[in-house]
Amino acid sequence: MSEHWYDRPLRIAALQCDFEAGQTLEVADKWAGAGFNVEQLFHPMADSYSALFDIEHHAEILSDYLARAQQNNLRIILYLNVHILGPTLASHWEDWAQRAVDGSCPKQYETYYVCCVNSPWRDHFFSVIDSLATFDIDGVFLDGPIVISGGCFCPHCQARYTSKYGGDLVDGEHQSKFIGESLHEFLRESYSRFKQHKPDSIFYINLPITASQAKYLSPVDQLPYNDLVGNEGGFMFYEPPRDAYLWRSSITVKLLEALAPDKPRVNFMAADQKPWSWYIHTPAETRLCIASTVANGANIWYGLHGDSSLLDTPGGKAATELMRFLATHESYYVATRSAARVAVLYAYATDYQYRVSSETSDFYGDAAEKSELYSGNFTEALHGFCDVLSRSGIPYDLATDLDLTADRLAGYDCLLLPTCACLSDESVDAIREYVKNGGAIVSSHDTSLYTESGEARTDFALADVFGARYAGRIMPYKNFNYFSICSEHPLVDHIDIPLLPAPESVVDVTPAESANVLAKFHAVQAGRYVPLTEPARPAIIHNRFGSGHSLYLAGTFGEMCAHYAPPEYQQLLKNAVAYFSEKSVSLQGAIGNVEVSVRRQHKRLLIHLVNYAGLPPRPFTAIAPQRGLQLVLPDAGAIEAPRALVADQVCRYEVHGNAAIVNLPELRDYEVIVVEQP
Ligand SMILES: [Zn+2]
């Protein structure tokens, strides 16, 4: 990793509007006092809830603010809105706004027109970039660009399309490609212009990272224009929080790390509980979001959407308390790398082709529901598996199928494939090679049954690895059928009840002769109040392949974890990790819901624990402290006495050969255990 100022931990503050009543400069003092070291500067240029620098109106206040920030050792990244026309620019809407196919101009947030990167707005924006050359800013953040649902059909897009490709701009594949290219060219030009003026400054955008967010331009194509990669993983909760996914921030920053392991990463966290801009999160939710972000090696962006007095609310105070802790202990957050030995595959091929769910978002928009042809749901399966790992305190990474190789996977003892239905031949080859060389996979449902473009294969591409062939049908099992364990094996230990709930969708498979069928689905029952049926088809298959292992789960086990969370499913995955990954760090004695993240920093291991044992429903207002926890480090080697940073004490520990067992102080919401390995 090359050395830039932004490789150091960034604690970024933002105020996304201006209700400061003339106290603009004082905001910089507040941030510094609260432990922040960067401001993504918006409020002096606020145009209601938009901001775009205008040298004529903002030169003086920006210069004054930069001076004040410098006195506070606060770096300044200028916020530039590149997705809406704020009130000041709204009069240009007829020429600059995106238009739907019927000629209408849809509004974002029910309020603002959406600017088009192919309209003259583009030149206006480039002139803004050029006008920043003489200001001593540390970077710019582009909030956008976005594309309205269905794509833009404004006269500028139509003319550009015709001059590029000939013919008329119409809905379809070519239009998608055109939009992608338009976005790409806009970002490339913006980036190079800014870097010409300020080569050492930072440039980044509000990066879309899932298929539903990045409809026209893949996340990878946008990476060259992001010195820092960031996503709104901490904008919560648009929907009622009762059912909100616990690990939203964690998996967002894990995916950012998978996409760009060598770049700094940031989780954008709204201080407020969406969609109420002035309603700040509870202290418990605030601390959990920040802690799970930094625990996974990312920076935090904490944004207010009201006035700066919101910092004095209980939630605001919780944020600043944790920010000051992070400032005091900054050295433990510099240039760390995940040391997880387990990974979950984020299969982009599946994300783009298969059925997924998407959350409501302010910024990236809602995804259209994809084909109902498929029986599983990739998002839910991923969430289900990640939920089990997180709640079980198993450290894990996300890996992606972008440029997947056996070498890249070699650092992991175990790779989970949750309904990774669509996989390219190259990805399949990499996974096969990884297992052959001694790796282990845990796959569910129709993993590898489709090509990367979503076409059905006649059999699993990984059939030889699974030790199972596709028998030609996927069966609805509804929610009253069963499976049962039929073989003794460590992979199915501690599952001591006779009949287990079957997932709602089951793949009919034929096991290979060499494979070990550990559990069987019972034949489908006519209803739930009828006599039990007999075991009829394989449910769980263990297979040796080369020097490695496969555990294949023939149904929507991941989706089932997300919906019903059967404890036995959790046990099954815990068994798999224990069996395949003997060197994984584990947590003993917890009642559950402690996220464990292990990161390496030279000869130092940092084990972050984030305690999500909040009392339901969400939003959490209290977290149950956990006592008597032990951290097992199977491969610790020689270590010095571990220290707990939050409790500020040395931990008692025992050494057994190469392993160490560390006794932890009472865990409130967050702790970091520092293990020096001289
Ligand atoms: Zn347009």
Image: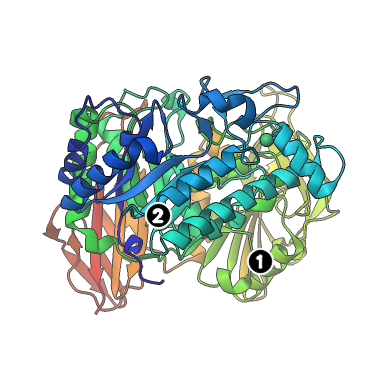
Label 1: element kind:
helix
Q: In which quarter of the image is residue 559?
A: top right
Q: Position of residue 373 (x, y in %)?
A: 79, 36
Mark 2 is on which residue type?
A: Ala
Q: For the residue carrying disc 1, how many other residues have a C-alpha within 10 Å: few (<14), some (14-19), or many (20+)?
A: many
Q: Is residue 359 left or right of residue 327?
A: right
In the rendered image, which residue does mark 2 sit on? 133
Q: Is residue 497 visible?
A: no
Q: Is residue 5 visible?
A: yes
Quarter of the image that includes the N terminus: bottom left
Quarter of the image that includes the C terminus: bottom left
Q: Where is residue 182 in the image (x, y as percent from the top left)?
A: 67, 47
Label 2: element kind:
loop
Residue 356 vertical placement versus 326 (above, below): above
Identify the residue at image location x=50%, y=30%. 362
What is the residue that sits farthest to the front in this orientation?
56
In the rendered image, which residue does mark 1 sit on? 431
Picture quadrant of ligand 1: top right
Q: In this view, does 562 lie to the left or right of 74?
A: right
Residue 306 vertical placement versus 594 (above, below): above
N-terminal label among 2 and 1 = 2
Residue 655 vertical placement versus 26 (above, below): below
Q: Position of residue 283 (x, y in %)?
A: 25, 33
Identify the residue at image location x=51%, y=56%. 193
Q: Mark 2 near mark 1, Cβ–Cβ under 8 Å?
A: no
Disc number placed over residue 642 in the picture, else none? none
Q: 200 and 422: which one is in front?
A: 200
Q: For the residue carrying disc 2, how many other residues have a C-alpha within 10 Å: few (<14), some (14-19), or many (20+)?
A: some
Q: In this view, does 162 lie to the left or right of 333?
A: right
Mark 1 is on which residue type?
A: Ile
